[in-house]
Amino acid sequence: LANGKLRSTTLDEFQKLTGLELEGEGGGLKEEMPPIQRWLNRILALRIAMQNAIFDEYLGLIEARIEAAKEAGTLDLGVESINAERITILDRTVIRRDQTSGAETEILRLDTEERYKPLALDRALRILGDDARPIVNRKSGKAAIRCSTYSLTDDDGEIVRRYELVRPTRTERMRQDLLLETMWEDASEADFSALWQAEVEEMSGKTRTNTLYLVTGLLLPVWDRLPDDHVQVWRLNTDDGQSFLGRIVPAPLVTKLADAFGIAATITVSGAETAKHVMGTAEITALGAYRLKRSLVAGQQRLELLDWPHTRLAELKVAGCFTEIIQHKTRMFVPVATAATVIDRITA
């Protein structure tokens, strides 16, 4: 509000409408703001249209921060659970043993097998309405429900309109302008139902396997030496009663963590894990002789390859990379859609 980034109102207008005095004598904000109850009471006394506009922008800002924290792994939700069909311990490495109690802190490499639980067609049909439209992707043969969701407000105060796509096995959010460039299109309920049911039947008997690195055991003495990102504590449960509690560490950070404790840990990180880590955290990550970073180019997040010599330009292009000349400089990028394969080729 003070920085003039809201579209619903300005600081001067807000003060006049609500009677709240927010600015001090020097022109800046007062050190002591009115209590939250007074804020809410004054806002609720405004016209309904103004109330809705203010709260829509406020919720958009909150959701943007929540999503950013989720991507960075810094959102604290307490202890969350992963319920798996099967958990297999592939290996375990002790990184600390308490001298008094003998309690150990370990890094476990786990394979988790989770069964897909697709949303049944009858429940999907109940979601449909004026603000939840059936759409299909003619190219992929998949169905989804397109719902309006909160817009985001970027750092410049611009409103970014978005849709939420509800799929049988997942939900994703997409900018409205980017959705228009895809193969998704409106569909009849009959076409939607046929494709939705086909995917439900296809996925019902399938499972997905993930490899996780879990720091478990006595966590408190080592907490400040664990990565600052991804501070979530997870409980992994299986149907046969197995349970593991600890901090999940992204694969690209395991070697760094092992080095911090002075132990040997040879970790093979897949291209998919590396790409996911860089896109999710924006951390610049070593990639063999190169480094990989997330870069915002033309409004889209890309994977950019750093430290590449021009003598290897042709080789990197054969591996699947592409270049663009931006501000008279040739920059190298890894396609996000095929990043896993391209990264594996580069590091082979």
Image: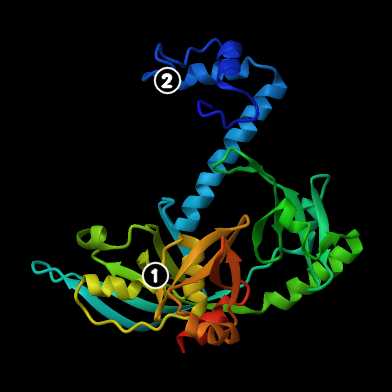
Relative to 19, is 288 on the left or the right?
left
Q: Residue furthest bottom?
A: 348
Q: Nearer the viewer, residue 203 or 130?
A: 130
Q: Which residue is mark 1?
A: 243
**Which residue does the image show at 49% across and 85% down from the upper left?**
312
Q: Nearer the viewer, residue 217 or 302?
A: 302
Dot 1: element: strand
Q: Quadrant of the N terminus?
A: top right
Relative to 126, is 212 on the left or the right?
left
**Which residue does the image show at 56% across and 86% down from the upper left?**
314
Residue 242, visible in the rendered structure: no
Q: Which residue is mark 2?
A: 28
> Picture coordinates of residue 104 (x, y %)?
20, 71
Amino acid tagged 1? Ser
Q: Residue furthest front?
A: 328
- Relative to 281, say whether 318 is above or below: below
Q: Residues within 10 Å of mark 2 (few under 14, many from 20)?
A: few
- Foreground mark, 2 or 1, reads 2
Dot 2: element: loop
> Picture coordinates of residue 193 (x, y %)?
85, 65
